[in-house]
Amino acid sequence: MKEFAKYIGVIVMIIGVIVLAIPFLQGTNSNTSLLVGLLIIIEGFLGHIFVNNLKNTKTGNIIWMIVLLVVPYFIFFFAKKAAYGDELESLN
């Protein structure tokens, strides 16, 4: 589970690529599908940085919450806890 949690951001980025590839393969590209795919890829990228950032401060978490938007923040936050739970507690 720890290894899976460390790579949750990359998995989200792959889902974003799939969201972009399916309309392309069907031959029906629209701006909506492109925008949704782009947003999912950006969220995955930022989420990967957040999960693998071992600094755990309240100010930093508030900034990440704003950057990641509130709902994806909690998904990546719990993935970070699952991946680095013991190491984060020792840093504080």
Image (cartoon, helix red, strand yellow):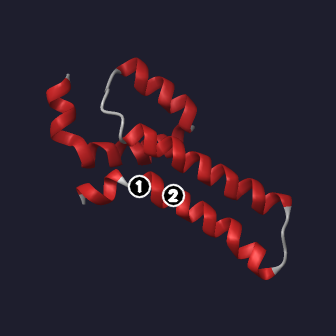
Q: Is residue 48 above or below residue 16?
A: above
Verify CB contact (< 8 Å) between mark 1 and mark 2. yes
Q: Is residue 58 above or below residue 54?
A: above
Which residue is more in the foreground, 19 or 71? Answer: 19
Specify whether 36 is left or right of 65: right
Which residue is more in the foreground, 19 or 73? Answer: 19
Rendered residue at 47%/40% (across/down): 73
Which residue is more in the foreground, 34 or 66? Answer: 34
Q: Position of residue 75 (x, y in %)?
A: 43, 48
Q: Which residue is mark 1?
A: 8
Q: Which residue is mark 2?
A: 12
Q: Can you tell which quarter of the image residue 54 is in?
A: top left
> Judging from the image, what secondary structure is the residue with disc 1 in?
helix
Q: Amino acid at mark 1?
A: Ile
> Judging from the image, what secondary structure is the residue with disc 2 in?
helix
Q: Position of residue 33 (x, y in %)?
A: 76, 62
Specify whether 57 is left or right of 69: left
